[in-house]
Image (cartoon, rainbow, N blue to C red):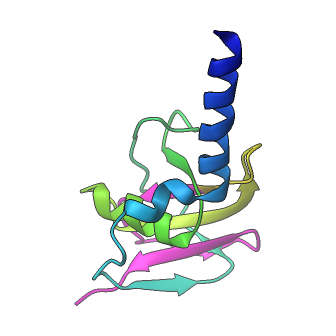
Amino acid sequence: GVDETLAQLEKVLHLYRSGQYLQNSTASSSTEYQRIPDSTIPREDYRCWPSYHHGGCLLSVFNLAEAVDVCESHAQCRAFVVTNQTTWTGRQLVFFKTGWSQVVPDPNKTTYVKASG
């Protein structure tokens, strides 16, 4: 009934908030990312689902490792921008990008780009 459904939803929420659902994901990526503090990429957006932004790919992640995993799983992803915004569950919002031809200053964001090579 309702009590069982609530208990299951609370369990899912706990796994989501704690990041425990990530324990079975790939341990590490072979791709290196270069960190560019206090910066963002104003364009080079692509759409993805489920995105928090209608014109771009804005997803919530538990940590940097999950952001890398998401970027690696999207064929068009070449960079991502970590914002200082979080969801109500405390997850960070991250924009995923197709490139980094224009990186501009932004004190509230950190950009990560795939290292060439």
- Please tell me which residue lies in front, 41 or 13: 13
Q: Is residue 27 visible?
A: yes
Q: Where is residue 38 drawn, in percent x and y? A: 69, 78
Q: Quadrant of residue 105?
A: bottom right
In the image: residue 28, left or right of residue 106: left
Nearer to us in this view, 105 or 61: 61
- As rendered, which of 91 and 37 lies closer to the eye? 91
* In the image, farthest residue toward the top: 1
Q: Position of residue 107 (x, y in %)?
A: 76, 74
Q: At x 32% / y 77%, what residue is drawn?
A: 29
User: Where does residue 30 sit, x and y in percent of width and height?
Assistant: 27, 82
Image quarter (top left, top right, bottom left or bottom right) of the C terminus: bottom left
Q: Which residues are magenta?
A: 94-117
Q: Quadrant of the N terminus?
A: top right
> Total marks drawn?
0
Query: In screen coordinates, is 96 left or right of 81?
Result: left
What residue appears at the point 59 percent right and 60 percent down from the top-left corner? 62
Q: Nearer the viewer, residue 18 or 43?
A: 18
Q: Quadrant of residue 115?
A: bottom left
Residue at image position (40%, 72%) is 101
Q: Is residue 2 above or below residue 64?
A: above
- Looking at the image, the residue that sits furthest to the bottom is 117
Q: Is residue 43 visible?
A: no
Instruction: Using the image, determine if residue 26 lies above or below residue 75.
Output: below
Write the residue at 34% across / 67% down: 78
Q: Is residue 104 magenta?
A: yes
